[in-house]
Image (cartoon, rainbow, N blue to C red):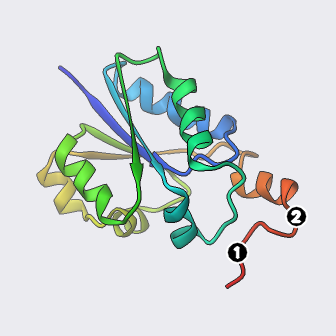
Amino acid sequence: MTKSTYIGGTFDCFHDGHKELLDVAMSICNNDTLYIIVNSDEFVKNHKNINLVDDFNKRAQNTYEYCVGKVEHLIMGKIETDDEHVEYLDSIKPTYMIHGDDWDGKRICERYMVDYPWLKERNIILIFTPRTTGQSSTEIRKQRQPDAARLPI
């Protein structure tokens, strides 16, 4: 049976925590199809209020290079607006949706503009993976940009 996995994120300051998250996603999809959806620079600016270290192209390249050749089908995407998560999920109908457990289910559903009944109706299983201790893009960003980790409000 074909299993596809959907994982979205910013993937700034690509680090071991991102690699572990992607490794989990690849193992769950059983080396079939992995959809990696990377947040655009504008999306991050509007939703996360951070100064990115890496631009979209670098972040997408890092995730692609880490995963290429490790799954049968690797499909990259880009999120520009909130409703695109719903469009992606509805069109690709992944078996699994993966996210780090630093977010709870309510916040994930709000971010992706879906709810648990919507996921269940489409047979999408939401899986949270443990956050890697000591790995944080926020902390790396603070070290690289001590005065610019957050955008002024």
Give the amino acid type for the residue marked by disc 2 in the picture: Pro
Seen at 46% across and 62% down, the residue is: 104
Secondary structure beneath label 2? loop
Q: Is residue 130 above or below residue 147?
A: above
In the picture of the structure, the residue carrying the numbered disc 1 is 151
Residue 79 visible in the picture: yes
Give the amino acid type for the residue marked by disc 1 in the picture: Leu
Of pointers 2 and 1, the one earlier in the residue sequence? 2
Seen at 26% across and 64% down, the residue is: 114
Q: Is residue 7 left or right of 88 when viewed as pictured?
A: right
Q: Quadrant of residue 105?
A: bottom left
Q: Is residue 148 above or below residue 54?
A: below
Camera-nearest residue between 69 and 100: 69
Report crowding for label 1: few under 14, some 14 to 19, many 20 or more residues within 10 A (C-alpha).
few
Q: Which quadrant: the N terminus?
A: top left
Q: Which quadrant: the C terminus?
A: bottom right
Report crowding for label 2: few under 14, some 14 to 19, many 20 or more residues within 10 A (C-alpha).
few
Q: Is residue 19 left or right of 32 when viewed as pictured?
A: right
In the picture of the structure, the residue carrying the numbered disc 2 is 146
Q: Position of residue 138 (x, y in %)?
A: 72, 58
Farthest bottom residue? 153
Seen at 57% across and 25% down, the residue is: 66
Camera-nearest residue between 73 and 2: 73
Q: Quadrant of residue 146?
A: bottom right
Q: Is residue 66 left or right of 105 when viewed as pictured?
A: right
Seen at 40% across and 18% down, the residue is: 71
Q: Position of residue 144 (x, y in %)?
A: 85, 53
Q: Is residue 27 above or below residue 22?
A: above
Distance (Cα) linking label 2 and label 1: 12 Å
Farthest left residue? 121
Q: Is residue 7 left or right of 124 when viewed as pictured?
A: right
Q: Position of residue 109 (x, y in %)?
A: 34, 64
